[in-house]
Image (cartoon, grey):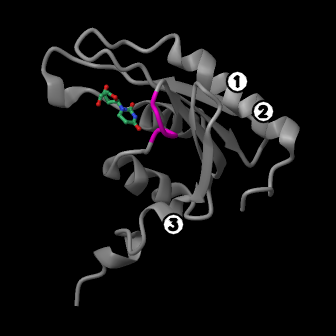
Amino acid sequence: MENQLDQTARDKLKEKAREARERAYVPYSPFPVGAAVLTASGSIYTGANIENASYPLSICAERTAIFQAITAGEREIIALAVTADTARPVSPCGACRQVMNEFNPEMDVMMLNLAGAELSRTAGELLPEHFTAGDLEQS
Ligand code: THU
């Protein structure tokens, strides 16, 4: 999975995630996060975390970016980059992992930090045995 995308495409996605981080709305945590997704059609959509005075209503950067793409009519996301100023590459939360898997368990998820560390996994690797549409079948 690591090298499925060429380096130019990977670098572009990382840059977009870094730019999106600058637009995070984080008055309650000091923790801006940026994300960018690449779709099968070749388009890039970005997202940042958006917090709320009612804390649980806050949304992560990853889901913001995915929902932007889906709302634009996209259905296949092939890669996602997420970045924050963390010691290790930022690790997506469980809710975001579930949402990634809805759209592509093979999605190339690039976890990054501002210092340049990087870790790539597929969405399926990040959430094995995720809940699927097939699980909604009742016996
Ligand atoms: N957050 C993200 O946006 N993505 C992650 O991968 C981890 C956490 C956000 C949620 C909240 O706004 C802040 O970071 C602190 O948890």
Of mark 3 and mark 1, the one earlier in the sequence is: 1
93 on left or right of 52: right
- Within-10-Å neighbours for mark 2: few <14, some 14–19, many 20+: few
Q: Which residue is mark 2?
A: 11
Q: Is residue 35 rendered magenta in the image?
A: no
Residue 15 sits in which quadrant? Answer: top right
**Of the pair 19 and 77, the residue shown nearer to us:** 19
- State the separation of the CA atoms marked 3 and 1: 24 Å
Q: Is residue 47 above or below residue 75?
A: above
Q: Residue at x 26, y 26 (%)?
A: 58
Circle 3 — which element? helix
Q: Amino acid at mark 2?
A: Asp
Q: Does ligand 1 reach within 8 Å of label 1's beta carbon?
A: no
Q: Is residue 109 above or below residue 69?
A: below
76 on left or right of 71: right
Q: Position of residue 7 (x, y in %)?
A: 85, 42
Q: Position of residue 2 (x, y in %)?
A: 73, 57
Q: Residue at x 69, y 40 (%)?
A: 38
Q: Residue at x 12, y 20 (%)?
A: 54
Q: Is residue 132 above or below residue 2?
A: below
Part of the protein shown in magenta: 86-90
Q: Which residue is mark 3?
A: 124
Of mark 2 and mark 3, the one earlier in the sequence is: 2
